[in-house]
Image (cartoon, helix red, strand yellow):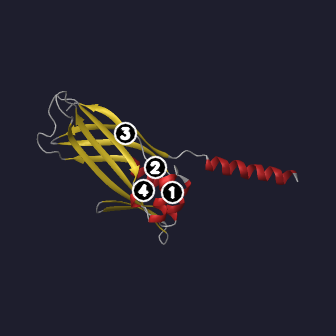
Amino acid sequence: MRKTVLLLALLFSTFSAYAAQPHGIEVRRAVVAPVEEAYVLDADIDIVLSAPLEEALNKGIPLYFQLEFEMVRSRWYWFNDKAVALQQQYRLSYNALTRQYRIGVGAFYQNFVTLNEALQFLSRVRRREELEPGALSKGSTYMAGLRLRLDTAQLPRPFNLNALGSREWSLGSDWYRWTVTP
């Protein structure tokens, strides 16, 4: 009897610890650095999927993430000047036949053995941006912003309806802001 109660307590504590794990996306660090005629966006992001999202992914539902980056110069005499506005979509999927996770960015795809490896790849942003000449003014101060979010509009219709009312299905970071002076 005592072993049964102890076993049940152990199972309950394990389940409640798993269910209570925090999930979400948080931008830890981001910088923009000039390199030759371009700029490099370098950011680290923490990504923890909720249990329902991980279960849906493992059942073959792809998850689409939207990376948004902007640089804005404030002006006192008119509206703010949005000098840079970029978006990048990432597609995270699982293939049950090969038992691999796959991340797609445009025409680039890469496979991973574990979900943790795929999320680590997704959480390291290293982008080289070729900006038009004169897009950034030397000596001006810009407010840069970065965020990553799950694009729930890309989910299949039944999951999309679930995402409307559930915090476990809506995943995204707040805007991470910092100043940049080229």
Check disc 3 and report the residue beneath it: 175
Report the disc number at residue 152: 4
Do residues under tags 2 and 4 come within 8 Å of each other at their CB atoms?
no
- Residue type, numbered disc 4: Thr
Please say whether residue 38 is visible from this viewpoint.
yes
Badge 4 element: helix
Label 2 and label 3: CA atoms lie apart by: 13 Å
Residue 6 in picture, x, y percent from top left: 80, 49
Q: Is residue 113 visible?
A: no
Q: Amino acid at mark 2?
A: Leu
Is label 3 in a helix, a strand or a loop? loop
**Whole-Å distance between the Cαs marked 2 and 4?**
9 Å
The residue lying toward the viewer, choosing from 25 and 121, is 25
Indicate the amino acid at tag 1.
Leu
Q: Secondary structure at mark 1?
A: helix
The local crowd at label 1, few if under 14, some if 14 to 19, many if 20 or more residues have their Cα within 10 Å, is many
Q: Which residue is mark 1?
A: 53
Of labels 4 and 3, the one closer to you: 4
